[in-house]
Image (cartoon, rainbow, N blue to C red):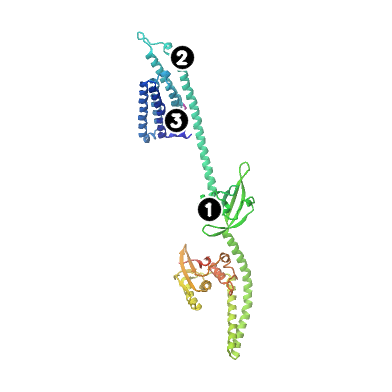
């Protein structure tokens, strides 16, 4: 079919094939005749071959123009082919010529490149020319008597008529068969073209469906080797070049997936670490991949990134805990504040009535300090458990951070701690300035407590998509991944002294103002807390 297509549509290929075909037939014929002593016939065959080359060069030179008129080109070629074949037949013996089969090739070529009617016309023309050649050669060889024409019987003879009849019949049969086969080939070509078009449409539809899925889809063979992976799957796994995964064992890409578990369609969850180091929670389900004969051919794995869902679930659980804790804290705060106020008042009365001594002053100071610590603890409880009041007024975030840093530096009085504030002023957000100061204070306190031997805390800001991003970077011990997941849990602390409410309050305050808090840390490489808040002009 490819060869037929080239003969039908490729002018250049047709010319090249004609050169090769003519060289083999006419060239070898010329050699045979020359060896046998028929030098005249050999010379004429070489002349005909040279003429074929000459015409071919003209065709090649005019091929750009002939492409616009393919039918004219093909008819012209057939005309010259019949003429050249007839000359070759005439000079090599006419009825006894070994090149009579050239008419057969010309008829077949006409049926291929043109139509069935063209093959019939070519057979007719070839037959007429052949009859004229035979008649003319017989007349030249017949001795004329007084100019009288030879009789038909004397020209053809019994054997000559039979030979000519079979040649002409052969031309006709070849035309009929070639035309029929050419029509069938064209019909098959059209049907094949339509089938290929339909197949391409189905293939594109199949690929578009797979690429448009919002879930990752893996197909595996029976050994667990990856056969295909759709676009969403590549994005989830962090493998943009899916070709690198083909043929690999799925357990080497997603540890925890084993072939033995693929027969179960039960949904499961596993932890997966991307090449960029990000850890995801994947939910997946598997099913058998079967052929039309229901024979098991492999497995299909459908998976989704459930990381955000898990985080939302954890936040929901935390919110539920906070709701219960809020109710408890509100009642507890009310019950604690009255006794604490009474204790504070009693201590002040005792201080006035008692004889002042160093021991008495120390004990009164301890009592006053502990009462104040309990009051602060109660207030932290209330902040953590009660809803954050939305503010419609704007505050200068940069100035709040600057004032907090100044107060914090004077309070801690540690010479081995350096705080570099690179946050510019006049960055406005909608929030409560007191709550923001408390959040910044807690972050600074957390940073210096992670650097017992001293170090530097660097504050910076940047803007992205209408939001302001604050970064608090320290040079402390860093945070292990196991601890990082619980960092903002209330009452969770790794310190010997502490309530575990500092970072929980930071998260509560920032999220209360439609922001978010994230942390980046590795053991021994310090920690960076990232606060994102909506910015207003």
Of the image marks 3 and 2, the number of the one nearer the N terminus: 3
Label 1 and label 2: CA atoms lie apart by: 80 Å
Q: Is residue 396 visible?
A: no
Q: What element carries label 3?
A: helix
Q: Does the segment drawn in magenta span residue 111?
A: yes
What residue sits right under mark 3 in the picture? 113
Residue 159 — which label?
2
The residue beneath circle 1 is 234
Give the quadrant of residue 127: top left
- For marks 1 and 3, give the CA distance: 49 Å
325 is higher (above) or lower (below) than 9 = below
Mark 1 and mark 3 lie on one chain; the one further toward the N terminus is: 3
Residue 269 pos. (x, y %): 61, 57
The extreme bottom residue here reads 355
In magenta stretch: residue 498: no
Which is nearer the eye, 96 or 83?
96
Magenta segment, which residues?
109-116
164 sits to left or right of 59: right
| Image quadrant occupied by the C terminus | bottom left
Q: Marks 3 and 2, Cα distance to the nearest angstrom?
A: 35 Å
Dominant SS type (magenta) = helix
Q: Where is residue 482 in the image (x, y as percent from the top left)?
A: 58, 65
- Disc 2 is placed on an element classified as helix
Residue drawn at x 62%, y 70% as measured from the top left: 325
Characterize the local packing of mark 2: few (<14), some (14-19) or many (20 or more) Cα atoms within 10 angstroms. few
Return the x and y of residue 121 as percentages of the image width and height: 44, 24
């Amino acid at each position: 079919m490819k060869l037929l297509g080239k003969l039908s549509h490729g002018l250049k290929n047709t010319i090249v094939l004609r050169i090769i075909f003519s060289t083999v037939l006419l060239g070898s014929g010329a050699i045979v005749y020359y060896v046998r002593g028929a030098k005249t016939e050999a010379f004429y065959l070489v002349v005909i071959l040279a003429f074929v080359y000459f015409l071919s060069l003209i065709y090649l030179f005019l091929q750009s123009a002939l492409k616009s008129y393919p039918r004219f080109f093909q008819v012209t070629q057939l005309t010259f082919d019949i003429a050249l074949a007839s000359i070759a037949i005439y000079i090599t013996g006419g009825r006894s010529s070994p090149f009579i089969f050239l008419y057969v090739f010309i008829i077949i070529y006409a049926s291929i490149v043109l139509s069935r009617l063209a093959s019939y016309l070519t057979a007719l023309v070839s037959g007429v020319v052949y009859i004229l050649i035979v008649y003319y050669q017989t007349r030249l060889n017949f001795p004329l008597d007084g100019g009288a024409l030879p009789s038909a019987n004397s020209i053809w003879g019994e054997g000559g008529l039979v030979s000519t009849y079979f040649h002409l019949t052969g031309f006709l049969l070849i035309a009929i068969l070639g035309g029929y086969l050419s029509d069938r080939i064209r019909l098959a070509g059209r049907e094949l073209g339509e089938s290929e078009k339909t197949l391409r449409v189905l293939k594109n539809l199949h690929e578009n469906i797979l690429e448009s899925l919002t879930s990752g889809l893996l197909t595996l063979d029976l050994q667990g080797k990856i056969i295909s992976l759709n676009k969403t799957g590549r994005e989830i796994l962090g493998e943009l070049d899916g070709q690198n995964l083909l043929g690999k064992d799925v357990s080497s890409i997603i540890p925890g997936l084993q072939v033995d578990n693929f027969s179960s369609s039960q949904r499961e969850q596993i932890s997966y670490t991307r090449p960029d180091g990000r850890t995801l929670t994947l939910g997946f389900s598997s099913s058998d991949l079967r052929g039309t004969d229901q024979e098991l051919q492999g497995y299909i794995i459908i998976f989704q990134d459930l990381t955000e869902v898990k985080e939302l679930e954890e936040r929901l659980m935390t919110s539920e805990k906070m709701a219960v804790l809020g109710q408890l804290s509100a009642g507890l705060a009310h019950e604690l504040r009255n006794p604490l106020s009474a204790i504070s008042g009693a201590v002040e009365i005792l201080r006035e009535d008692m004889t002042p001594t160093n021991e008495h002053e120390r004990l009164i100071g301890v009592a006053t300090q502990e009462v104040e610590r309990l009051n602060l603890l109660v207030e932290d409880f209330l902040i953590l458990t009660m809803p954050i009041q939305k503010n419609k007024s704007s505050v200068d975030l940069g100035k709040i951070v600057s004032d907090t840093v100044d107060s914090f530096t004077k309070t801690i009085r540690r010479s081995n701690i350096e705080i570099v504030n690179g946050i510019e002023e006049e960055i406005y957000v909608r929030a409560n300035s007191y709550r923001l100061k408390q959040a910044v204070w807690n972050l600074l306190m957390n940073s210096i407590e992670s650097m017992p031997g001293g170090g530097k805390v660097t504050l910076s800001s940047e803007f992205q998509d209408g939001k302001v991003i604050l970064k608090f970077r320290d040079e402390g011990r860093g945070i292990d991944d196991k601890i990082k997941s619980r960092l903002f849990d209330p009452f969770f602390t790794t310190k010997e002294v502490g309530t575990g409410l500092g970072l929980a309050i930071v998260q509560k305050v920032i999220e209360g103002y439609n922001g978010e808090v994230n942390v980046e840390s590795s053991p021994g490489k310090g920690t960076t807390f990232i606060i994102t808040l909506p910015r207003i002009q």
